[in-house]
Image: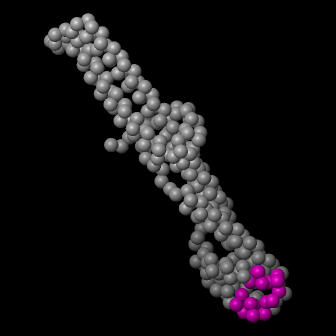
Amino acid sequence: MTLESPKGTTLQLIDGNPDDLLRSAKDLITSGEEMERSAARLEDISNGTSDLKSEAIAKLRENAGDVFPELRKAAIRYDGTGQALKKYSYALDRVQGALQMCTAEGGVDSYTSLNALITDIEDAHQSVQTKRSQEDTAEGAVDDADGFLGFSEGTDEEKAEAKSDLTEATAAREEAEEELRELWGKFDGRVSYWEDAYDEAVGEIEDAFKAADNDDKFLSTLGSVLGWIALGVGIAALFITSPVWGPIASAIAVIAAVA
């Protein structure tokens, strides 16, 4: 049987592995940083900072001007996406683990995990069902004592005892329902926190795409351009011993590998 909170939220675990998300986020951020550094180096090459002269280097400089703007856009997209996922991974970890926050209907959520909270909600729901059944039984006993539906009327003592049992059963049912209500409040609080984090992450990723103003299609054309760049690096590497040009050649090789 699927349980739902008073707000209509289905009782279930929130999927996702925070550790895997965080690793992916860091990989994206690192890739974005490498792309930005490489774009800056390619921009320098395009602007003619090199005094190397060869047909390969000239072709490298010509194509570097076409590549670095798109590479810089990709860097913005990768970094923005990574930062959004990084923040979301922390929020997801809180939701699935020790949230430690106060909700309007559930009070302080001191549960160590969402799984533990769900288990208690399931137990509390079963307890409410049991208490309601016991209250129904107690109400039937009161009716019997009152001679309802042709039953012989009980003694005053039996009537008093039946009413006392009903009072206790009602109080137990109300207590169980209140406990369940508070647990549902904690669960809805976690879901609300998660939904806000999820929407924020989606919004930030969309912003990263808009800021980059590109998509992965540029990589298909970038590959052919980098063919010339890779050739230039291969030839230039035979002559480059400068500590300045060495890192630039390495960066271009990395760009070619990425593409």
Q: Position of residue 226 (x, y in %)?
A: 65, 83
Q: Residue at x 68, y 82 (%)?
A: 253
**Farthest residue in the top direction?**
156
- At a point 67% along the width and 78% down the height, the residue shown is 255
Residue 177 lies in quadrant: top left
Question: From where the camera sits, is residue 53 visible?
Answer: yes
Q: Identify which residue, 32 or 108, lies in the foreground.
A: 108
Camera-side residue: 91 or 244?
91
Compared with 132, 231 (above or below) is below
- Is 241 part of what is drawn in magenta? yes
Give the number of callouts: 0
**Viewed as shown, does residue 135 lie left or right of 98?**
left
Q: Is residue 146 above or below residue 65?
A: above
| Quadrant of the rendering where the C terminus is positioned | bottom right
Residue numbers of the magenta segment: 232-249
Which of these two is toward me, 152 or 150? 152
- Please say which color scheme the image uses: one colour
Location of the N terminus by quadrant is: top left
The residue lying at 24 percent from left, 14 percent from top is 143
Q: Is residue 21 magenta?
A: no
Counting from the top left corner in percent of width and height, residue 131 is at 34, 28
Query: In the rendered image of this protein, does residue 97 appear above or below residue 185?
Result: below
Which quadrant of the view contains residue 239?
bottom right
Residue 8 seen in render: no
Residue for point 36% across, 16% down: 167
The part of the image, by quadrant, that contains residue 130 is top left
Measuring from the top left, give residue 134's x and y in whole percent. 30, 25
